[in-house]
Amino acid sequence: MNNTTSHQGRLKSLRAAGIGNALEWFDWTLYATFSVYLASNLFDKTDARSAMLATLAVFAVGFVARPVGGWLFGRLSDRLGRRTIMVLTMLLLAISSLGIALIPDYQSIGLYASVALLFFRLMQGLAHGGETGVSYTYVAEIAPSKHRGLWSSSVYVGVTLGVMAATAVAATLTWLLGAQAMGDYGWRIGFAIGGVLGIYALFLRRGAQESHVFVAQQGQARPPRKLSTGRCSALHVTSSCLLRPPMSLTTPGSRSALRRRLLRAWTPRAPTSPVFSRRSSVCAGCRSAECCPIG
């Protein structure tokens, strides 16, 4: 029963990762498909050629931001967990898509429309880079050992489905609304669909399980226990303390042995172990300077 539940949880996590990858590439492709409408609405359309070149330059900014996002979110995933970062990247993708859909046109706010598009595209590129590296790692870690190649290939299936879905949405909206309506408001519907689907994938990922590889690594990274310091007590009395009888100071031999131990204790030497070393005073419990941790 536990194995069945675990397998179902893995399948649920795989579905959440795959849908997220598909929506990631849906938003990414939608920008290229609607670039003509972005140029005519968010840039100065008195010079159509310059507006189109500016739109493609903003599109290139996303590619520049992708490796930065992969490095940043890859490091964060090693500290915060794969699932947490996947939820964060999907949240950024949903915000960026909805933000592009709600940007006022150039005639309303002027240059700020172009700056807003650049900002959301930069956010989209960072999230895209982080999503790619972390989700690929996540799927490989949660996959069963016998089917790791098959499960990892589902990521690329999601990429293809996302590209095809963005093209199909653009074609469907153009067929239903026409060229004039697409230039006025239809392109915003496409980005709004991407944002709403991104929120749906966000809730799917919140219910996914964390990678067991990351959980195991976190368990191994616990800091070592610190030894207690101070005088010899019941918490750190070593076996030599328990086995060695109390030293009597009445016989000459005992006094000579104590003198030799005191001399060795006061003589500066390199410690033989990073944990245990000779103390600068005699242990109160066993009359020895060699059995206690560093004070």
Image (cartoon, rainbow, N blue to C red):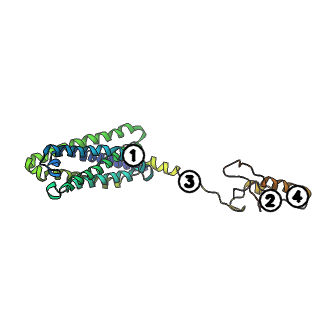
Residue at the image position 84 percent from the left and 59 percent from the top: 247
> At label 3, which amino acid type do we have?
Pro
Residue 21 placement (x, y as % from top left): 30, 45
Q: Is residue 146 visible?
A: yes
Front-lying residue, 70 or 232: 70
Residue nearest the viewer, comparing 283 with 240: 283
Q: Mark 3 points at which residue?
A: 223
Q: Is residue 278 left or right of residue 216?
A: right
Kindly identify the residue that appears in the image at 23 percent across and 42 percent down. 163
Q: Do callouts 1 and 4 mark residues in contact (Cβ within 8 Å)?
A: no
Q: Mark 4 points at which residue?
A: 255
**Sequence-first tag of 1 and 2:** 1
Amino acid carrying mark 2 in the image: Arg
Q: Which amino acid does label 1 sit on?
A: Trp
- Answer left or right for 237 relative to 186: right
Quarter of the rendering occupied by the C terminus? bottom right
Amino acid on which the number 4 mark rests in the picture = Arg
Residue at image mark 1: 71
Task: Examine the rendered structure and indicate whether residue 277 appears above or below residue 165.
Answer: below
Question: Disc 1 vs disc 2: which is toward the camera?
Answer: 1
Q: Which mark sits nearer the N-terminus, 3 or 1? A: 1
Disc number placed over residue 92 in the picture, else none: none
